[in-house]
Image (cartoon, rainbow, N blue to C red):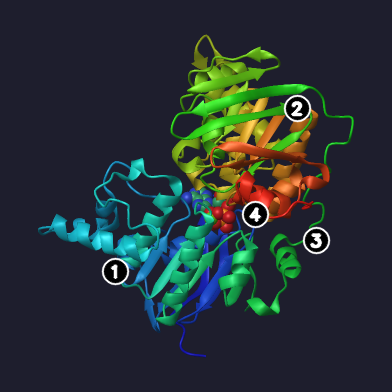
Amino acid sequence: MAQPILEVRGIRKRFFATQALDGVTISLAPGSVHAVVGENGAGKSTLMNVIGGVYEPDEGDIILEGTKVSFRSPSDALGRGIGFVHQEIALCQHISVAENIFMPALNRPGFVDFQDIYKETKRLLADFEGHAHIDPRQKVRELGVSQQQVIEIVKALSVNCKVIIFDEPTAALTESETEVLFRIIGTLKAKGIGILYISHRLAEIYRIADTVTILRDGNLIETNAVSALDQVALVNRMVGRDLTDIYPAKAAPGTIGDAILTVKGLACKGVFKDVSFTLKQGEILGFAGLVGSGRTETARTICGLMRRTGGTVSLGGKELHIRDYRDAIREGIVYLTENRALEGLFLDLSISKNISVMDLGKVAKLSLIQAKAENGLAQRYVGEMLIKIASVGQKVNSLSGGNQQKVLISKLLSVAPKVIIMDEPTRGIDIGAKAQIYHLLRRLASEGIGVIMISSELPEVIGVCDRVAVMYEGSVCGVLEGGGVNERSIVQMACLSSEEQENHGRGVA
Ligand SMILES: Nc1ncnc2c1ncn2[C@@H]1O[C@H](COP(=O)(O)OP(=O)(O)OP(=O)(O)O)[C@@H](O)[C@H]1O
Ligand SMILES: [Mg+2]
C-alpha cells in the first residue's frame, strides 16, 4: 500500500467523566474514502475534531505524510491541508456567502479585493452543480439548510487540501445535492486526496467508501474493507449486540379513534396551496414527498411559524386561530424542527435548562426557577429517553448529535402536547437510537397523542407509519394506508403529478 497520507495512533481524549476516545488508531490511504461509523456518542466527531485541530488529544500522535504534527487550532490544521465539513452547520449567519467561504483569507492582515472573492465564490458554486444561482453577496441566514450545507462543503473545497473530513455531510442535503457531492468526492479521490467520511446512512458507506472503521464507546472495534463486511455484520458490530425489532408493531385494527387534528384547504401564499388531511387518535401519520414538496412548510404553518393565508386547522373539532408558535403550544401542538442546531436548542445552555425552557411555570415558584425541580424534570427525561450524558448540568453542545435530538424531543414532551409534529426526527441518529425513537412515537400514539412524522427516508416511513400522506408540489396528492404503504406507491405519488400517474398505468398496488 502507498504511504498513508494521514495516520493517527493511539488517540485518547477525555471530557470530564467521559472517555470519548480510548486509544484509536487509523490510517488513511491517499485517493481513498475511509468511513468511520458507530452509534451516537461513539466518538466519531471527537476523533475528527482531534484530526481537524479543534481538540488537542490527551495522548497519541497525528502523522501527516510521514511527519508527526500537532495542530494548535482548526486554522492551523487547515493551513496544513486538512479541510473539515462539520456535523453542525457552523457558518456565520449574518454575513455573506462569499465572506463565509473566504473567512480564513479575510482574517489575515492585508487588503481584500471583494470583487475577486465574489468572482471566485461564483466559480466555486458553479462547480457544485445546480447552485450557480446563489448570490455570493447574499447573507447566509437567508438560505435554506441544504444550501447552507452546500456552502460548508464549497468552503472546504476552496482550499487545496490533502485530507477532507466530512462529518455527516448529507444529513441536511437533498437527494440531488447528495449525488453532486458523491461525484465531487469521486473527483477528489482521483486527485489523490484522502477522505474521512462519517454517516449514519449505511447505504452511503457501501456506495462510496473503500474502508470502514467501527467505533464503539471510544474504542476501535474493527477496520476493514467495506466489501468484507455486509450490512448486518456492520450494524451488529456497531451496536455490540444483535439488533432486532427496529420497528414497533403498527396500531392494531380497532385501536384507531376519531380525528384529533383536521386540516382543510390550508394555504400559505407562494409556498403551498391546498393541504387537507386528518390525523386520528392512536395512529402515526407519515408525511412523504420530495424535498421541496411543502411538507416542512405545512408543519410550520400549522404551528404558526409561517403565515397561514387560507384554510382551517381544527383540534378535537374546534377550529383554532393560531397566529404564532406560542398559540400553537398553548393549544397543545408542538413541532420538532428539522434544524435542531439553529432553532431547536440553546447549544450553550445546560440539558436541564433546555428541557424546562418551554414551560418554566412547571419548575418555578413565585416566578423563581427552582434548580432542583428543573434538574428533576431533566433527570426524568434522561432516564426515560436513555439520553447518554455525564450530568444534567452539561451543556447541550457537548452532547453527540443523537443525544441532542433526544433532549429536543424531551423539551417538547415536557409541555404534555396533544399533537406532536416531528420533522425528520431521526436525521443524523444512529440505528439503535432510531429504534428507540420509533418505539417512543408508537408509545405516544397509543397514549392518545397525535403523532405526525415527516421523513425523507422511505424505509422508516413504511416501517413506522400507519397511514402516509404524500405531498406533491404543495398539496397532499394522496393518503396511503394498509398494504398501500409501500415504496413503489409512495415514490410514484411523490414524483409524478396525478395526470402522469394516470398515464403511467393503473393497476399499481
Ligand atoms: N466538548 C465536550 N464536552 C464534554 N463531552 C463531550 C464533548 N464532546 C464530546 N463529548 C462526549 O464524548 C462522547 C463522544 O461524542 P462524539 O460527539 O464524538 O460522538 P459521535 O460518535 O460523533 O456521535 P453522533 O453520531 O451522535 O454525532 C459523547 O459521550 C459526548 O457526550
Ligand atoms: Mg458526531
In the rendering, at what x and y percent does residue 467 appear?
75, 38
Query: Is the CB–ligand 1 distance for label 4 below 8 Å?
Result: yes
Q: Which mark is residue 104?
A: none
- Residue at 50% x, 59% y is 176
At 32% from the left and 52% from the top, the residue drawn is 134
Specify few, some or many for label 1: CA neighbours under 10 Å numbering under 14, 14-19, or 20 or more: some
Q: Considering only order in the chain, which callout, 2 or 4, is on the residue closer to the N terminus?
A: 2
Look at mark 3 in the image and give the residue it sits on.
242
Q: Earlier in the sequence, mark 3 or mark 1?
A: 1
**268 or 53, which is in the foreground?**
268
Q: Is residue 34 above or below residue 218?
A: below
The residue mark sitting in front, 1 or 2, is 2
Residue type pointed to by label 1: Gly
Q: Amino acid at mark 2?
A: Lys
Category of crowding for the residue at label 4, using alpha-carbon neighbours closer than 10 angstroms: few (below 14), some (14–19), many (at least 20): many
- Let me know if residue 389 appears in the view: no
Q: Can you give x and y, in whole percent of width and height, for residue 212 in the image?
A: 60, 73
Q: Which residue is mark 2?
A: 280
For the residues labelled 3 and 2, the Cα–Cα distance comes to 34 Å
- Amino acid type at mark 3: Asp
Image x and y of residue 301, in percent? 52, 28
Give the residue number, with chain letter if any, for mark 4: 430
| Tag 2 secondary structure | strand
